[in-house]
Image (cartoon, grey):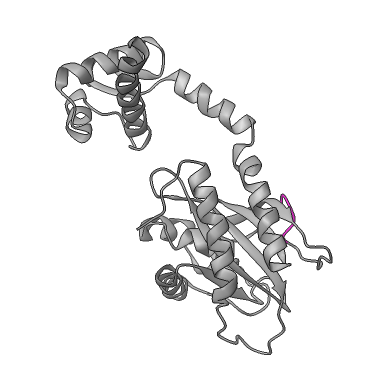
């Protein structure tokens, strides 16, 4: 009986932590109560318990609450265990077995796409996107799969000048208006493609992975040989279906929420 009665309180406490983590600054207890639909007395009790345990911090002069050191330590421990890579690896392996192409897990690192994992088919092709490699995100399918889900202001901050648009093969967006048009198209479509933007003779298809707030946290990509004298306009929906299955499975594994 005691355990079951504690479960709702635990869930409310976790909801408070998620709310604090999802906001750019500290919140008042009244805001927490309103956002979560909790009685004020319950909210103050939860915040007091979280503060005592170190998961929340009270700023008395501001009458607000933010995340505490214990929450930071928990997040740091989470990162040390490489959870994203561990959860993604078997999904990438299944994807490779399904399509027989190289698959990657990538994240945004500033204006670059950083590759964390690579799984290869039995006869792999030589490509530049190895683990630890960083490439201009506006040229890669993985980068644009994530950029397409970011606010316009954030994209603009990542690409402030014409010099931000690195060129590798003569293909791909060369300025912010061109990038925005491409991102709008790919957001509507649901996946991103690149046809020789990174390496001539290769193309990629990528789908985003989302965190619990519906924000793009990573992307899953397949890369394959494709020779075309000019951009062919192909979008490879069959491959996108497979990358989307893998990305959605990873989103679910990390407790994420796919964007509506």
- Pick out the residue farthest to the bottom: 229
Q: Residue 22 in the image: state x and y as whole percent.
A: 36, 37
Task: Tell me if residue 172 comes above or below residue 22 in the rendering.
Answer: below
Provide the major secondary structure of the magenta segment: loop
Task: Tell me if residue 187 comes above or below residue 155 in the rendering.
Answer: below
Task: Tell me if residue 102 comes above or below residue 41 in the rendering.
Answer: below
Q: Residue 49 in the image: state x and y as whole percent.
A: 32, 12
Q: Quadrant of residue 202?
A: bottom right
Residue 179 placement, left or right of 123? left
Residues drawn in magenta: 129-133
Task: Tell me if residue 86 comes above or below residue 53 in the rendering.
Answer: below
Q: Is residue 111 visible?
A: no
Q: Residue 112 in the image: state x and y as whole percent.
A: 59, 56
- Pick out the residue farthest to the front: 1
Given residues 42 and 203, the one toward you in this image is 42
Which residue sits at x=62%, y=62%? 221
Given residues 217 and 170, the one toward you in this image is 217
Given residues 137 and 95, the one toward you in this image is 95
Given residues 193 and 96, the one toward you in this image is 96
Residue 222 placement, left or right of 219? right
101 magenta-colored = no
Q: Is residue 100 visible?
A: yes
Q: Quadrant of residue 206?
A: bottom right
Q: Residue 254 in the image: state x and y as whole percent.
A: 51, 41
On-image quarter of the N terminus: top left
Which residue sits at x=52%, y=64%? 144
Q: Number of marks in the image?
A: 0
On-image quarter of the C terminus: bottom left
Which residue sits at x=54%, y=59%? 245
């Amino acid at each position: 009986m005691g355990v079951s009665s504690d479960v709702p309180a635990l869930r409310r406490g976790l909801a408070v932590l998620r709310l604090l983590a999802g906001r750019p600054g500290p919140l008042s207890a009244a805001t927490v109560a309103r956002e979560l639909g909790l009685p004020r007395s319950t909210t103050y009790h939860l915040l007091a318990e979280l503060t005592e345990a170190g998961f929340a911090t009270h700023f008395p002069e501001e009458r607000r609450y933010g995340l505490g050191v214990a929450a930071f330590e928990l997040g740091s421990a989470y990162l040390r265990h490489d959870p994203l890579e561990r959860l993604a690896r078997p999904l990438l392996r299944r994807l490779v077995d399904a399509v027989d192409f190289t698959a990657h897990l990538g994240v945004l690192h500033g204006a670059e796409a950083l590759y964390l994992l690579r799984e290869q088919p039995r006869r792999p092709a030589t490509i530049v996107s190895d683990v630890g490699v960083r490439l201009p995100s506006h040229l890669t399918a993985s980068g644009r799969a994530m950029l397409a889900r970011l606010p316009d202001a954030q994209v603009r901050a990542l690409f402030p000048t014409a010099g931000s648009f690195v060129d590798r093969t003569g293909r791909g967006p060369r300025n912010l208006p061109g990038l925005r048009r491409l991102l709008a198209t790919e957001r509507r479509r649901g996946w991103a493609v690149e046809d020789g933007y990174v390496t001539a003779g290769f193309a990629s298809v990528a789908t985003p992975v989302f965190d619990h707030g519906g924000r793009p946290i990573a992307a899953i990509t397949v890369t394959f040989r494709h020779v075309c004298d000019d951009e062919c306009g192909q979008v490879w929906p069959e491959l996108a279906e497979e990358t989307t299955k893998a990305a959605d499975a990873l989103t679910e594994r990390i407790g994420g929420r796919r964007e509506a």
